[in-house]
Amino acid sequence: MNHEVKKIIEETMMKVEVMVMLLILSMMIIIALTVYVTYYTFKMRSRLTCMAGMMIAMTNAMMSSVALGTIFGVYYNSDLSTPTIIAVAYGMLIGYLTGKPISMMAALDGLGAGVMGGMMGAMLGVMLLPNKIDLTILFILFVFIVVMVVLLKVIDEEVSASSKNKEPERRPFFANPILLVMIVLFMAISTYGKNYVLSSGEKNEFMVPMTTYGGNDQQAVINVKVAAYEPNNIFLKAGEPSVLNFQADKLLGCSSYIYSNDLNFMASITPGSDNFIEVGSLDAGIYNYACTMNMFSGTVTVQ
């Protein structure tokens, strides 16, 4: 493998890692702010009216489930059921825990908002086009932060209205609006600075286009599962034209792309159809391939 191909592989892996870090950091911010609002509402429950509690529980559950559902929808790609279950369950839990200390009516409002937000967020994440993922995640995160900061201000106003001498509680560092905006800006600069593969509409020369299998070459069918290739070792005859056929019902995260140092290809996999990659006539030996983050791999044994 020449230096140019190796460089492209390393850059691609780094770009996908940036995408994963974007999702992880966004999820950490969402969970941290959601839990803090829940805690702060519980602490101030005696100073909040039922109407205020309903609004707080609904907003907290709705925003957290929408944001989290979008992230998990992107991560699970074509699988809508898993992100929906996760987001709805999280939204319902947050809605209930936020509203219950104030009244059952507020808890019910939170439960309903969690269900609605979880379904909408998961659908949005799954339907996103690859070149719109980064922009949408950053936008959803920014909107989430703005709404949660305003929600905390509303809670402070409600508390102050019931006790004129009450001073607003000092916020933890992760709830500081200035810090949160700086983090989002840093994430945006890091994301677009890397120009990673999922947000680029261009294909480099290393990207192998799919071909139509004519039936004249020996074909090896490889099933792309959630976290494995089945079989993970296939056998081909040496010296004969060969085709690899990657098939997948659904794709998870980095499994959307497959690359091989040994066979000099990188390909984007489309679920629900054949994905043929012509590898030519190979000499005897073992050839490796993997997902773009090397989380799982397989081999081609030629003999």
Image: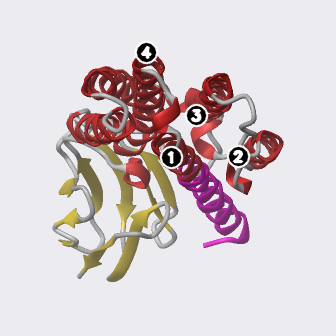
Other-residue count near label 1 (Cα within 10 Å), few / some / many at <14 / 14–19 / ≥20: few
| Tag of residue 43 | 1
**Front residue (pair 157, 127):** 157
Question: Disc 2 or 3, which lies upstream in sequence?
Answer: 3
Q: Main secondary structure of the magenta part?
A: helix
| Left or right, residue 170 beside residue 233 | right
Q: Secondary structure at mark 1?
A: helix
Compare marks 2 and 4 and give the one earlier in the sequence: 4
The amino acid type of the residue labelled 4 equals: Met
Residue 241 or 191: which is nearer the viewer?
191
Question: Rounded to the nearest whole Å, what is the CA distance between mark 2 and mark 3?
Answer: 30 Å
The answer to which of 271 and 86 lies nearer the viewer is: 86
Number of other residues with Cα within 10 Å of mark 4, as a class: few under 14, some 14 to 19, many 20 or more: few
Q: Classify mark 2: residues with Cα within 10 Å, few (<14), some (14-19) or many (20+).
A: few
Instruction: Give the CA distance from mark 2 to mark 1.
Output: 10 Å
Badge number at residue 169 = 2
| The N terminus lies in quadrant | bottom right
- Tell me whether circle 2 and circle 3 mark residues in contact (CB < 8 Å): no
Q: Of tags 2 and 3, which is closer to the observer?
A: 2
- Asked whether 13 falls inside the magenta stretch, the response is yes
Q: State which region is magenta.
A: 1-25
| Neighbourhood count class around disc 3 (C-alpha, 10 Å): few under 14, some 14–19, many 20 upward | many
CA gap, disc 4 to disc 1?
Answer: 17 Å
What element does badge 2 sit on? loop
What residue sits 44% from the left and 33% below the top? 70
Of marks 2 and 1, which one's residue comes earlier in the chain? 1
Q: Reading the chain from its start, which is encountered first: label 4 or label 1?
A: 1
Which circle marks residue 51 in the picture?
4
Measured in 3D between alpha carbons, the distance from the residue under mark 2 to the one under mark 4, in whole angstroms, is 22 Å
* Residue 151: percent from left, percent from top: 60, 27
Report which residue position mark 3 lands on: 137
